[in-house]
Image (cartoon, coloured by chain):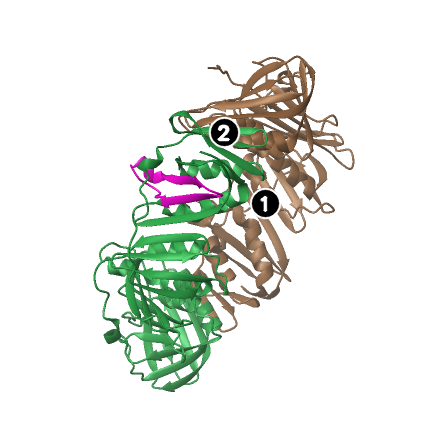
Chain colours: A brown, B green
Amino acid sequence: MKVVCSKENLVRGLNTVKSAVPVRTTLDILRCVLLEAEENQLVVTANDTTLGIETKFEALVMEQGAIAADANLFLSIIQKLPDTDIVIETGYNYEISIRAENAKFVISGMDPNQFISLPSIQFSGEAEVSQFTVREMIRKVIFSIADSNLNAAMSGVYLEVINDKMRMTTLDGHRISIRVSALKGEFGLNHAIIPGKTLNDLSKIITGDHEKMMKILFSQNHMKFIYDETTMVSRVIDGEYFKIESMLREECETHVKVNKRMFYDCLDRSTLLINESDKKPIILDIREEEMNLRLRSQIGSLDETIAIEKEGNNLKIAFNPKLLLDALRVIDDEEVDVYLVKYNYPCTIKDSEGTYKYVILPVNFTEE
Amino acid sequence: MKVVCSKENLVRGLNTVKSAVPVRTTLDILRCVLLEAEENQLVVTANDTTLGIETKFEALVMEQGAIAADANLFLSIIQKLPDTDIVIETGYNYEISIRAENAKFVISGMDPNQFISLPSIQFSGEAEVSQFTVREMIRKVIFSIADSNLNAAMSGVYLEVINDKMRMTTLDGHRISIRVSALKGEFGLNHAIIPGKTLNDLSKIITGDHEKMMKILFSQNHMKFIYDETTMVSRVIDGEYFKIESMLREECETHVKVNKRMFYDCLDRSTLLINESDKKPIILDIREEEMNLRLRSQIGSLDETIAIEKEGNNLKIAFNPKLLLDALRVIDDEEVDVYLVKYNYPCTIKDSEGTYKYVILPVNFTEE
C-alpha cells in the first residue's frame, strides 16, 4: 500500500473513528485502525465489536492495499507532523513508514486480515433526521441513563420512530427523560434500545449542522447511522424497554411556573452544602406567588425565596437538587412549568408542545 | 462584624490569597481565610505558615470585626451568588451569614484569634521590578527545579539582585536554567533561595502588567513581595546555593544556529516514541549545514534532517528530548544558538545579550 493524503483529512478521519477503539483490551487488533487504500480514497475503520465506525476521504493511491495500525500511536504521529501532505507506505512484515517533509517515522503495523470487519446486516426500517436534531436530543436525555450494569436496558437510550416523529427516552430509577422531535416524512414504526456509549460517541462526531441529514437504519440486533462519508454500526441492547406510559401521570394538583435561571441558580447554590456522607435534599415550599427553597446540612444552610406563578394547592416537597439541575440544564425555555401532585409523588417538568418531559421522584424529608 | 462588598472584589480577593491555603492539613484553622473588616475596607488573609498572602479592597463596614472562614467553602459560596453586593455578618458562636438578593447562606466560622498572623519582619534589602518581568522570569526557569525533597536547594529558585540586574537560577541535576533582567535603578546585592511553590503561586496571581511595578524585600529567613493591594510573605530555603559559575563552560568546539520552531517540532515528534520503560535518547548528528535527528525505540523510529548554520567540528551527541524541549519552549527567539564541546559535555543554549542560558547534560548512546 502506498498513499498520499492531506494531514487535515487524515486527522479528521482518525478522530471520527477513534471512539470505536476500546480504551482497554487484551486483543491487539482491536487497538488498531484499518487503513484501506482503494481507488482515489482512503477508508479508515475502527471496531470494538459493539461499535464500529468507518469513514473515507480523498487520497492519491499509488498502490492499493491495506494495513492495520495502532490507532492512538498512529493518530499522535499524524497530529505532530507538519501541516502538509503525508505519505503512508507499507513495507516488509507490516512495517509502516509515514513521511511528511523531512520527517520519517517507521512503526510496526498488523496484518489487515486479522481486523474484524463491520458486520453486514439486512436492515428492516429506516428514518431520516437532521444531524443537529439527533445531537441535541441525545444531549438532552443521555444524563439520566444508569451507570451500572445492573439493568442493561437502563444503560441505553430507547429510540422510537413513530411515523413522522422521533422519540428518545432514558430512565435510571429516579427519573425519566423524554424528548420528541418531528421528522420530515413518514417512516413507520421502529424502536431499539441503543447503548448510551454509542449515542454519546455519535453526538461527539456528527457536525451538528441544521441542514445536514443523517440516516438511521434499524435491524433486529444492530443500528446503523449514516451521515456524510461516515457509517456507524452499533449493537442494540436486547429485550423489551420499560412500559413508561404507566409511569407518566397526567394528574396535577399544583402547577408552578417559574423563571428557569432563578430556579437553576438557587438549586445550583444548594449543592455546595451536600457532601457524600450527608446527602440532604432541598425542600421546595410552594406558596401563593412564591417558592421558598431551603437546605440544611452539616456544612451549613441555604434559604432563598423566588417568585412563581402558582395554580392549585400549596405544597412542601423535597428533591435531590442534582436531579432537578440535570433536567433544567437541558431546557432552553426561559420559564418552565412544573406539575406536582403530592409530597410523595413525582414531579413533571414539561412544555405544552410535548417536545420534552422530565419526571423526577421526590425524596423523604424531615424539618427540624 | 458586618460588612457589605461587591462580589467581584471579594472573589478576586479570595482567589488572590487561596494559594496560601494548604490542600491537605490536619489543622482546621489553616484551611481558613481571615476576614477583617476595618474602616472602609475588608482585609483577606491566608497563611499556610510557609507562605502567607494578604490583600484588601473597599467595603462598606457597618460593624468592625474579624472572622475566620473555611476558604474553599466560602469562595464556592461567593462564586455561586448573584453578581451583586454581598452582606457578610457574624453571629453567635462564630456563625457567618452571607446574603445576596434573596439568598441567604449560613455556615460555621472559626475564632479569628486562632488564625496565625503573617510574621512581622525587619527587611534588610529591597528591589523594584515590573510584575511582567517577574512573571516571565519565573515561567522561564521554574520547570527545571527538582521535584524531590532530596535536596532542598534544588527545589527552589535562586533569586539574586546584583545592583541593576535581577537573576533567577534553577537546576535539577540534569540542567541549569538562568534568566537575567535589567532593573530600573541600583539595588545593591541580595540573594535568596525561594521555594518553587511560592514563585509559582506568585506568577499566577500577579497581573503581569508591563507598567505595574512590585517590590521585593529580603531578610534572613523571609521574602516579601508587595504589589497593588497585595502582600505575600514566604519563608526562604536555608543554606547556600550551588556554585554554578564553575559549571558554566565558556569553551565551544561546535556552534550551531538553528530555526527554533523546526528544532522544537522535531524533538516534540520524537517524544511519541518514548515510554516509561524505554527512555531512548534522540541523537543529534551535526554535519555541515544540516543536523540529522534520529530516535529508535521499541515503539518505532523517527529520522529527520533540518538545515543549520554550523561553525567548528562535526559532532554526534544525544539528549533526553524533553530537556531540550523545556528550554526551547520558553525561548522567544526565532533562531537559537547552541554551543557544544564534545559528546559527553553539556550543551548550552544562550543568547548574545546574556538574558538567558540553558545548560543541558547529554546522555550516553549507542547506535545499532
* Image position, residue A82 (x, y; %): 53, 67
Three-letter amino acid code of the residue under disc 1: Lys
In the picture as drawn, the residue positioned furthest to the front comes out as B39
Q: Is residue A250 magenta?
A: no
Q: Is residue A195 left or right of residue B264?
A: right
* Image position, residue B143 (x, y; %): 36, 61
At horizontal 67% and vertical 23% (from top left) the residue drawn is A308
Q: Quadrant of the C terminus of chain B?
A: bottom left
Residues in magenta? B21-46
* Image position, residue A336 (x, y; %): 68, 28
Q: Chain of mark 1?
A: A
Q: Quadrant of the N terminus of chain B?
A: top left
Residue tagged 2: B105
At horizontal 48% and vertical 53% (from top left) the residue drawn is A71
Residue B292 position by quadrant = bottom left
Marker disc for residue A204: 1
Marker disc for residue B58: none
Q: Chain of mark 2?
A: B
Q: Is residue B25 magenta?
A: yes
Three-letter amino acid code of the residue under disc 2: Phe
In the picture as drawn, the residue positioned furthest to the right comes out as A185
**B202 up-or-down from A315: above or below:** below
SS class of the residue under badge 2?
strand
Do we see residue A129 in this rendering?
yes
At horizontal 56% and vertical 17% (from top left) the residue drawn is A317
**Disc 1: CA contacts within 10 A as few (<14), some (14-19) or many (>=20):** few
Q: Nearer the viewer, residue A94 or A213?
A: A213
Residue B23 position by quadrant = top left
Residue A345 position by quadrant = top right
Do we see residue A193 in this rendering?
no
Q: Nearer the viewer, residue A291 or A245?
A: A291
